[in-house]
Image (cartoon, rainbow, N blue to C red):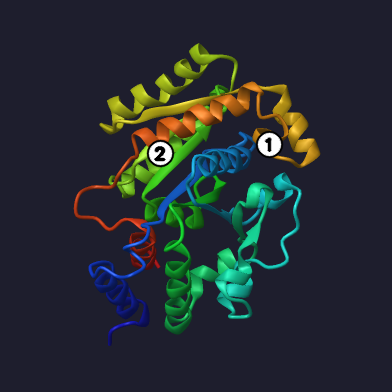
Amino acid sequence: MKDQAQSLRQLVSEKAMIPSQASSKKLGKVITVSSGKGGVGKSNFTLNFALALKSMGKKVLIFDADIGMANIDVLMGVSSRFNLYHLLHREKSIEEVIQYGPEGLPYIAGGSGIVDMLSLSEDDLNYFVAQMESMAAEMDYIIFDTGAGISKQNMKFITSADQCLVVTTPEPTSITDAYALIKVVHGSHPEVKFDLVINRAGDEKEAAQAADKIILTAHRFLDLDIKMLGYVSDDPYVVKSVKRQVPFSIAYPKCEAARDVQRLALRYLAVPAAREPGSHSGIKGFMHRWLKRT
């Protein structure tokens, strides 16, 4: 007998092939921001990258998908009344679950709901898909801030998204763990697209050297081409902004790190990455791939 998840996967696949009123608005490109290890400033980058895209006229939503260390709301100095749990259990609609931070930046706090996503019934999955699609119709980008390292949950997010930005620092352990993440993901899902972000770089030269260690190794041993999207300087104003619980691009808009993120966002918009021809993109594609891995 056909299992429930299989029937829903077929439904999502069929819907992804049919133009709809929602898809005619926006695709809602899905990006994951990940890292091989914790403590590299991944969430802080995610937040300020989203704000940079928003300042350029893009509609962006952050989805805090870090189960153990969810802290997007802490970095913004806001409190989340609702999270994904309330949506999955139908206590709130997605419009009610979406919270707003500085500059009106929308975000969804994941909380315990991330774990619940792995064991939903067909009916609940169908509801979740419909809610996500209604939200994505209004967004240009949906950014999932995943946990650090290689876990079952992280793998599902990374391999279901349109693109993965891997954040690392120039520290050897951070570089090694970032490469390990890329290697494991590429080994099981070679279609996943990666870009590198070097955080806390002393200067452009150090950032390029750190990126080259991953780029050259991936090319040699994985036959995988990766590029460095950009870097963010090791700026003391970043630490000050964290203590103030205000994004550094807002608290200190002229600081070096803020300028770096602006340049990085401009570069991202200039050359957007894409999945292989014929594959589904946007939130429909994300849900299609997510359900295949469920």
**What quarter of the picture does the N terminus occupy?**
bottom left
Q: Quadrant of the C terminus?
A: bottom left
Q: Amino acid at mark 1?
A: Ile
Any part of residue 53 in sight: yes
In front: 222, or 123? 123
Instruction: Give residue 271's position: percent from left, percent from top.
Output: 34, 34
Q: Give me the residue at 42% from left, 63% from top.
A: 137
Question: In this orientation, which residue lies closer to the viewer: 48 or 34?
Answer: 48
Q: Secondary structure at mark 2?
A: helix
Residue located 67% across and 52% down the image: 101
Looking at the rendered structure, the number of numbered marks drawn on it comes to: 2
- Examine the rendering and report whether any part of residue 177 can be seen: no
Horizontally, residue 40 falls left or right of residue 292, namely: right
Which residue is denoted by mark 2 in the rendering? 182
Q: Residue at x 34, y 78 (%)?
A: 8
Question: Residue 45, how many percent across, how many down?
Answer: 58, 37
**Secondary-structure class at tag 1:** helix
Instruction: Please tell me whether residue 23 is drawn above or below residue 175 in the rendered image.
Output: below
Q: Nearer the viewer, residue 152 or 44?
A: 44
The residue at which mark 1 appears reads as: 250
- The reply, left or right, for residue 243 in relation to residue 30 is right
Q: Work out how far the residue at label 2 is from the one at label 1, CA to CA, in angstroms.
A: 32 Å
When asked about the image quadrant of residue 165, the answer is top left
Outermost residue, front side? 57
Which residue is rendered at x = 74% and y = 34% of the image?
241
Which circle marks residue 174 in the picture? none
Residue 106 pos. (x, y %): 60, 56
Q: Is residue 93 above or below residue 180?
A: below
Question: Label 1: few (<14), some or many (≥20) within 10 Å?
Answer: some
| Residue 264 point in image, percent of width and height | 48, 30
Q: Earlier in the sequence, mark 2 or mark 1?
A: 2
The amino acid at mark 2 is Ile
